[in-house]
């Protein structure tokens, strides 16, 4: 094993360095009767020891259960997958201009057709959902001869339960559950059970296949150095999801209990006094439109409708805000409710979220997309008789973000282009578009307009007349002009 050489250590010419003992005290390091129970579960386990197979199994099952039964959990996971992957990544090849331009376009079209054939966007969205609730996503690269595509490369998604080493205790090699590592901690192979442990055909028991690391994509977030298996993104929020459902059910039960009692009879007379004798907790059913005479000395009253409690909405708001924080997601996206936001606060909250999305997209490119492209190119070079090159420079485009105010964004974009603080490539990339493709399309449109004798103004699509009941923009007559200009 080769190690990076250490720099020469400074030594003292005469004698040894004096030994000094530092005494420091931190409040968080003190164990008191008040905080003993709070820190009872704190431990010093390594990353892989803390995320051992049994712990991950329990957490996975609970996260899946919550996502399957909690509408907010399901919506948050779906929104995260849709925002990260969207309609899928688009490839742009960056070979040198000139004769290679045709090669760029040919590769881009072929890859796009293959991505549709294997449903690459759908599989990537499923992987993002799996990472959120299972902690990790696995995709096996294999050759699918039944695929309707000249390139037969395909992806088979595998649940985290199936990537495991049943005889891990007897393994002598450097390994963690489901992964064989080399001396430097890099994955060499993966152990994949032949059947899902929770499936019907579990008779195969300990039988598993050893898949080389080159054929397996393992996408997870490394929260600690040395972590080899992932933990769910929603792990810190699992107790909060449970509290949210419990509180909602408790409020509903209280409201139903109050609604079940139509009339409550009460008396101020002491026992054995002037009021008529009535059996305690006795009930009576009422028919519609009937006159009822109550017992002597008893006064009817109705239960006040005090449910849901006044703090119910505030409780849901705060707990959802805390849940979404572990995903860098603002409240209005997690709750799908922006009623309490103005334009400025909504934009400010979204900046952190969209930055997190860009980081995840970059991670997905490095972990999965670049490896998929390498495997695809290895086969596509032979199938399409492409020229041999040492490297295939490229970049990925993702869906753009729609601006809340397109007119303001258009003016800001124009200023940036005039000031040379941006480029057409950057501006189109923000919208998830290939600038070369868009400019070629625009050139075709201009040639056709010249051929038909149309001006740019005449070619603008006519806006429909507002239907009856549609909102008018009378309070801001400039909006119509802005939309037409955009």
Image (spheres, grey):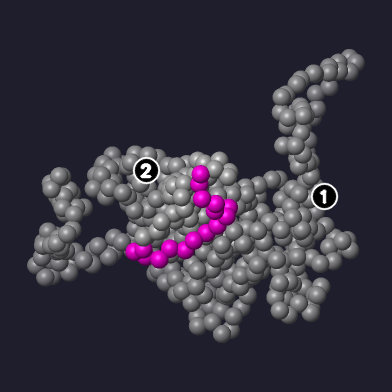
x, y percentage for residue 155? 59, 72
Residue range corresponding to the magenta coloring: 274-290
Circle 2 SS class: loop
Name the element at disc 1: loop
Which residue appears at 76% of the width and 77% of the height? 202
Q: Residue 314 at what x, y percent from top left?
A: 46, 42
Magenta span has 20? no
- Going 49% across and 67% down the picture, which residue do you hit? 121
Please state which of residues 464 and 183 is positioned toward the viewer in this rendering: 464
Label disc, if present, on residue 409 of the rendered structure = none
Q: Which residue is mark 1?
A: 1
Snapshot quadrant of residue 446: bottom left
Q: Position of residue 99 (x, y in %)?
A: 40, 67
* Magenta stretch: dominant secondary structure: loop
| Percent position of residue 404, x then y | 31, 49
Precedes in sequence: disc 1 or disc 2: 1
**How far is the residue under mark 1 from the one under mark 2?**
59 Å
Q: Circle 2 is placed at which residue position? A: 340
Q: Is residue 30 visible?
A: yes
Q: Quadrant of residue 470?
A: bottom left
From the viewer's side, name the closer residue of 161 and 389.
161
**Magenta stretch holds residue 283:** yes
Q: Quadrant of residue 347?
A: top left
Mark 1, other Cα within 10 Å: few <14 / some 14–19 / many ≥20: few
Seen at 71% across and 50% down, the residue is: 227
Left or right placement of residue 392 versus residue 403 in this view: right
């Amino acid at each position: 094993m080769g190690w990076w050489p250490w720099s020469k250590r400074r030594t003292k010419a005469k004698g040894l360095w004096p030994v000094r003992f530092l005494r420091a005290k931190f409040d968080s390091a003190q164990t008191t009767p008040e905080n003993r129970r709070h820190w009872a579960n704190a431990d010093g386990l390594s990353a892989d020891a803390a995320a051992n197979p049994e712990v991950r199994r329990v957490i996975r099952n609970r996260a899946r259960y919550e996502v399957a039964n909690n509408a907010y959990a399901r919506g948050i996971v779906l929104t995260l997958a849709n925002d990260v992957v969207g309609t899928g990544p688009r490839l742009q090849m960056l070979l040198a201009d000139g004769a290679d331009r045709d090669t760029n376009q040919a590769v881009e079209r072929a890859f796009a057709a293959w991505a549709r054939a294997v449903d690459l966007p759908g599989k990537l969205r499923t992987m993002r959902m799996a990472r959120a609730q299972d902690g990790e996503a696995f995709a096996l690269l294999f050759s699918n001869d039944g695929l309707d595509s000249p390139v037969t490369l395909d992806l088979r998604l595998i649940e985290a339960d199936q990537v495991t080493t049943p005889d891990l205790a007897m393994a002598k090699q450097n390994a963690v559950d489901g992964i064989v590592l080399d001396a430097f901690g890099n994955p060499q192979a993966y152990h994949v059970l032949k059947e899902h442990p929770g499936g019907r055909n579990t008779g195969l028991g300990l039988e598993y296949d050893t898949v080389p690391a080159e054929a397996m994509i393992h996408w997870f977030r490394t929260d600690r150095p040395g972590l080899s298996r992932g933990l769910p993104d929603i792990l810190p929020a699992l107790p909060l999801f449970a509290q949210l459902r419990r509180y909602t059910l408790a409020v509903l039960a209280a409201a139903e209990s109050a609604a079940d009692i139509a009339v409550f009879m009460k008396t101020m007379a002491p026992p054995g006094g002037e009021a008529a004798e009535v059996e305690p907790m006795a009930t009576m059913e009422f028919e519609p439109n009937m006159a009822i005479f109550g017992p002597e000395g008893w006064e009817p009253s109705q239960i006040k409708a005090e449910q849901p409690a006044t703090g119910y909405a505030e409780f849901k708001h705060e707990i959802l805000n805390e849940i979404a924080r572990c995903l860098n997601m603002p409240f209005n996206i997690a709750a799908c409710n922006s009623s309490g936001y103005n334009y400025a606060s909504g934009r400010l909250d979204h900046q952190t979220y969209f930055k997190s999305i860009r980081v995840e997209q970059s991670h997905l490119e490095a972990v999965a997309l670049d490896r998929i492209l390498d495997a695809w190119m290895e086969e596509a070079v032979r199938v399409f008789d492409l020229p041999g090159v040492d490297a295939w420079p490229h970049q990925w485009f993702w869906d753009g973000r729609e601006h809340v105010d397109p007119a303001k964004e258009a003016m800001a974009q124009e200023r940036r282009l005039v000031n040379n603080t941006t480029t057409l490539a950057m501006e189109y990339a923000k919208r998830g578009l290939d600038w070369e493709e868009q400019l070629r399309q625009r050139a075709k449109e201009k040639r056709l307009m010249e051929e038909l004798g149309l001006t740019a103004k005449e070619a603008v699509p006519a806006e429909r007349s507002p239907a009856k009941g549609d909102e008018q923009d009378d309070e801001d007559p400039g909006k119509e002009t802005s939309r037409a200009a955009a």
